[in-house]
Amino acid sequence: MAKTLTFGIMHLGIAFSVTYALTGSLAISGAITFIEPAVNTVAHYFFDKYWDRRERRGNHAGAEAGPEAPAAPRLAAA
């Protein structure tokens, strides 16, 4: 958990630094620093829902296809 928290703080620091370097505005940099992770969090939620549906469809389609063909018999070593 400490590594995750540290990474989160580092991410916010980098986001602030980059946006401040680009804009020169503390207000814009501060807003972007906190808005971007919030938008990413919401996007990730919907992405996970989509991905779960995609995997369920893939697993369901594979089950309907039937069993795989049996492997070719092995020849005995001489």
Image (spheres, grey):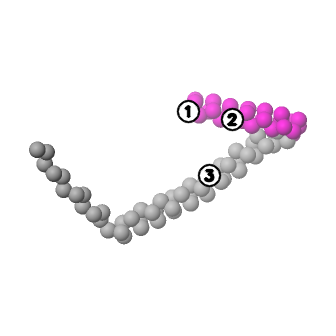
Q: Check disc 2 and report the residue beneath it.
A: 11
User: Alpha-carbon neighbours of circle 1 within 10 Å: few (<14), some, or many (≥20)?
Assistant: few
Is there CB contact under 8 Å for labels 3 and 2? no
User: Alpha-carbon neighbours of circle 3 within 10 Å: few (<14), some, or many (≥20)?
Assistant: few
| Looking at the image, residue 65 lies above or below residue 10 | below
The disc labelled 2 sits on which kind of residue?
Answer: His
Q: Quadrant of residue 21?
A: top right
Q: Is residue 12 left or right of residue 72?
A: right
| Looking at the image, residue 74 lies above or below residue 2 | below
Q: CA distance from mark 1 to mark 3?
A: 20 Å
Please state the horizontal and vertical placement of residue 35, each as a whole percent of the image.
76, 46
The disc labelled 1 sits on which kind of residue?
Answer: Met
The disc labelled 3 sits on which kind of residue?
Answer: His
Q: Check disc 1 and report the residue beneath it.
A: 1
Q: What range of the chain is rendered magenta?
A: 1-27
Q: Earlier in the sequence, mark 2 or mark 1?
A: 1
